[in-house]
Structure formats: structure tokens, C-alpha cells
Amino acid sequence: MKDKQIERLIKAEAKRQRDGLELIPSENYVSKDVLEANGSIFTNKYSEGYPGRRYYGGQEFTDQLETLAIERACKLFKCKFANVQPHSGAPANLAVYAALMEPGDTILGMDLSHGGHLTHGHPMTLPSKIYNFVRYKMKDTKTGEIDYVDLRRVAQETKPKIILAGFSAYSRNLDYKKFVDIAREVGAITVADMAHIAGLIAAGALRNPFDDGFDIITSTTHKTLRGPRGGIILTRENEEIAKKIDKSVFPGIQGGPHMHTIAAKAVAFGEVMIPKFKKYAQQILKNAKAMEKVLHKHKIRMIGGGTDNHLILADVFGSMGISGKEAQTVLDEVGITLNMNVIADDPRKPLDPSGIRFGTPAITTRGFKEKDCALVAELMLETLRNKDNPKKKIEIKNKIKALARKFPIPKSFV
Ligand code: DSN
């Protein structure tokens, strides 16, 4: 690379990714093929519109590419329609809201401190200024079960246009059927934001909301799907809804699609279809369970009592008297990357919350199995217990480095 300043930063980041343990549950390592497609000359092309209906010429190959990506997405998620153009998860969600609601309309989603995402109506986001977000919560943080009785009550009272299932910090399975039943009672459309677990759903490791009658799924493509940074919107079968969504993505909120990203999405979808990916998805779940077991053993409070998916949300302030922010910083020092996170009805502030959120997608890509993940969990807790002991922390840092070297990022991924 001629630009040495940028080259230096890329190399430094590559080293950081190699030498540390990535536990942020929304991150992963993409394959060389995904990277190659993402860095391809499709980045040079403008393709406003959709296959066969573009505004500019020269679309012979972009049309084939986008059609392939759409076909693969539909096959993976068992649906009739896919829009592969959203630049990421936030615009995908905004496009769905704009397609199906008028300003001022009501949307029912998960409470943000109970696991919902910023784009599900955080007061600082644009959608929250346009639409009226109302909330449901967990019934009990010990089990993580959603309060479906209250969800029905709020739905009947507020008559939302959309009922939104999905999360970015929730570790249990949702009862999609109950969402669909309630939505049908009140005439709402069901949308599942599956950004975190899309890869697990596509691989059959977790239940597909479409199997229970959900209308729409939105997702990012870079988490458990192990693709490039990007978004998708899937519609189970309703063509009218799919058309509205297409219009809402373009020209509604986006301009030209990023064809290089769409190329990389298509590659990632192809990789998910390979049987090896099924094993990968199952291993993510087993690895998260192995970490859960260690936390149980050490009596660390987990929101929802444990995990059914790839992530764990632990109340480190309640269990160890260490804030999420301090835990994140101390763990960073020894080479474990995860993120601080609010917990349900957190008594602390979002920028210094009670919890940490971590998960297994990235380390599972590196080949970690249950016993390795149990060791990582033990090292995490040992680090936190020794947060004021620099000598011990250096010792742990060396152990982490040795562990990371034992599991190099696979050759097809670097
Ligand atoms: N930042 C992503 C996450 O970590 O869940 C979602 O926006």
C-alpha cells in the first residue's frame, strides 16, 4: 500500500485482532473470500434501483450479482423476498418503519434496558422522534422470560402498527408464536430484528421467526452471519409489503447501493450454506453454555439467568462491586475485548453501567471449544478479582496471549 500511514494502522489492527480474544458478541472474523469481494471493483459502480430497473447503464453484472445475493438470502431464511441493499442494521430498521408507518404511529418493542436495541426507539435516535415507541419487558430477570401478558395488554391498549421482536443484549429464546398471536389480535405487522442471531437461525441452530409466521426479519450481515458490515430485510411472503420496503430503502432513505458489499454478502450467504457452518453455529451455542457454567459456579448474576444463544449479560457491579466500564477497561488491559452494557432497570448510568456483555461467535471462528471457553471465563473472573494487582494482570495477559496464539485466526480468514 502506498499510503504508509493507513497501512501502519491496518497492520496494527490486524495484530490487535490476532493477539487478543474478541468477546464482543456482535463481532466476528470474515473469510478471505468475503474480504476479497468486499474490496472488489464493484465499489466503482453506481446502481440506483433494483435488478432490471436501474437508473444508470452498465448494470449487466451488478444485476446478476444482486439477484444472486437475493436468491441466496431467500433460500437461507426460507422467505420469498429479500432486500440486500441496506447499508447496515440501523437503516434497515428505519426503512421498515418508514415503509409501514406514518409519522406518529405506534410501534411496540422491547425495553432498551431489557435487551432492546438503540434503533428500537432510544430517545436520542431519529425514529424515536418520528414514531411513538411503546415497550414490553422481561417478566423476571432470573429467567429472562418476556412478560407476554403485559405485552398483550400494551398491544391492545396502544394498537401498534408494528410489533418488534429482537434485541442486542438478550440471551434467551423468544416465543415467536406468542408475538404473532398477539399481533394478529391487534392487526399489527410482526418484525424480528435478528441482527445478533441471524447466522444461528440460518444454520438451523435457533428457531426461525418465519416458521412461526413473522412477516419481516431485519438483520445486519456482519455478526453471526460472518459477512461484511451491512444489512438485509427479508419478507416472508407478502409481496405488497416487500414492494413497500424496496421503495423505502431506495429511493426512500438510501441512494446507490454498495455493490461491493452486496458481493461480499452473497459470498457470506454462500458460506453459510456449507454444512461446516452448521457445526460452527452449534459450537457457538455450546461455547456460550460452557462460559455460563463457569459464571454459575462463581455465583455471578447473569441477566436472564444464563444463555440460550451466543451471549451472556453479567451483572458485574451487583456480583463483584465492579462497574461495567471498569470491567471493560481492566479486561482490555489483559487482551480480552468485550463491552460494558446496561442491565435490566440498571441503577447505574449507561456510560458506566452495571453489566458486561460478551459472547462466543468470534472465538468460535478461531476454533475454541467448550473447555477453552471455560478457561477464558475463568481468566476473565480472575482478572476482575485481581484488578488492582498489576503483577497478576501481567501473568494473565501472558496466558491470554498464549491462548490466542494456540488458536490463530484460520488461514482462510487472514
Ligand atoms: N453495535 C451492535 C451490537 O453490538 O449489538 C448493534 O448495534
Image: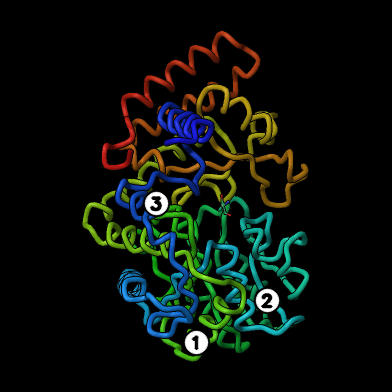
In depth, the one of 177 and 266 nearer the eye is 266
Q: Quadrant of the C terminus?
A: top left
Q: Quadrant of the N terminus?
A: top left
Residue named by callout 1 = 243
Specify whether residue 369 is in view: no
Q: What colour scheme was applied to this rendering of the protein? A: rainbow
Q: Is label 2 or label 3 in front?
A: 3
Q: Is residue 195 left or right of residue 66?
A: right
Q: Please name the residue shown 37% across and 82% down the image.
A: 80
Quick one: label 1 or label 2, which is nearer the N terminus? 2
In depth, the one of 275 and 317 nearer the eye is 275
| Secondary structure of residue under mark 2 | strand
> Is there a contact, CB below 8 Å, between mark 1 and mark 2?
no
User: Residue 107 bears which disc, if any?
Assistant: 2
| Secondary structure of residue under mark 3 | loop
* Mark 2 residue's CB less than 8 Å from ligand 1: no
